[in-house]
Image: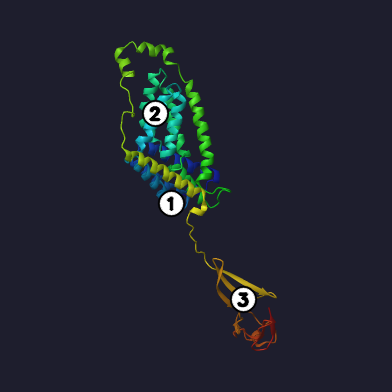
Amino acid sequence: MDFLMNLGEGSQFAVQLAIVLICLFYGAKKGGIALGMLGGVGLIVLVFGFGIEPGKPAIDVMLTILAVVVTSATLQASGGLDVMLQIAEKMLRRNPKYVSILAPFVTCFLTILCGTGHVVYTMLPIIYDIAIKNDIRPERPMAASSIASQMGIIASPVSVAVVTLTTFLVNAKTPLAGFDGYLDLLKITVPSTLCGVLAIGIFSWFRGKDLDKDPEFQEKLKDPEFKKYVYGDSTSLLDKKLPQSSWNAMWIFFGAILVVALLGYFKDLRPAFEKSAPAQVVEIVSADKAVKTFNVKDGKIVEKKRLSLPKKITNVIKCKNPRCITSIEQELKHIFILTDEENQVYRCKYCEEKYTR
């Protein structure tokens, strides 16, 4: 595959990008284990075809993702998620006429608190029931709520996306100036997400015709079975009595989020671990001569050394005296003896020719 290496830099990038996208899209289309297998095929092509060095596994990111997934699963298993959904339904049913605006914000906030957009699945039947019972086109709040629930992921302090992006930015070789943690990221993502959700709600408010002005819908309502299907049984969580343990689980979850936020904002609350660095050699030079060396580690002197010149050096320098025996007999070794250490003076062993630094 030498022809791939001989391509221009721009051409190599285009081919590499195409390989990655093809593997991702085709793997996603097939689903299951095919995505992992095609990812491996793409990796082989990039490594052996383009000579790209594989990176190290992002263990920190993997552990962070695992922690977030376990936290969300614990909230659902303990019943805390049911409490949050019940509160959200109460808010929507108190203001049914504004469900197209409120529903996206409700699902967005649920995602922000839970760290996953899958909470919208439980809310969609409730949103549909509120909208259809108030003659509001259901696609307005439902479509906006689905999008808003996914937008809330980037604004959630406990979502995989936020913690992964924060880990990459903090551990980057060239960190961003002023970026000190995930709270700095949330200062940007939370306001922008809320503005985007508001824009979606306003757009959905005018989406499609009102049900009472939709001739196709009104024509279908003449069918009793269709009308019963549309206005049939109500879906609600309000009639479900939740135990006190579910409420406790929700408050514990909120408390954990608050603790994480405080630890992320205040550096003094986090434990600091000293990183051991290799010792650095520092020389003290006097009159162009290095007289002492220090081994400095972690800001402390761990070893002192005084430099001394060797008493005899062999075959390092050559005697320039043309009458020296070493100039005649080439096989002799060039030996110099230290005669004045203070002034760094050496003399040839054979002719006593003087040499200084």
Say few, some or many: other residues with alpha carbon within 10 Å of mark 2 (under 14 / 14 to 19 / 20 or more). few
Considering only order in the chain, which callout, 3 or 2, is on the residue closer to the N terminus? 2
- Outermost residue on the left side: it is 225
SS label for mark 2:
helix
Which callout, 2 or 3, points to the residue nearer the camera? 2
Residue 292 tag number: 3
In the picture provided, is 91 more to the left or to the right than 13?
A: left
Residue 90 tag number: 2
Q: Is residue 265 visible?
A: yes
Residue under numbered circle 1: 60
Q: Amino acid at mark 3?
A: Lys
Q: Nearer the viewer, residue 113 or 162?
A: 113
- CB atoms at circles 2 and 3 under 8 Å apart? no
Residue at image position (33%, 39%) is 246
Locate residue 357: give its quadrant: bottom right
Q: Position of residue 267 (x, y in %)?
A: 52, 52
Q: Is residue 142 visible?
A: no
Considering only order in the chain, which callout, 1 or 3, is on the residue closer to the N terminus? 1
Q: CA distance from mark 2 to mark 3?
A: 78 Å
Residue at image position (43%, 28%) is 103
Residue at image position (51%, 38%) is 190
Q: CA distance from mark 3 to mark 1?
A: 43 Å
Considering only order in the chain, which callout, 2 or 1, is on the residue closer to the N terminus? 1
SS label for mark 1:
helix
- How many numbered circles are shown? 3
Q: Position of residue 259 (x, y in %)?
A: 45, 47
Residue 220 tag number: none
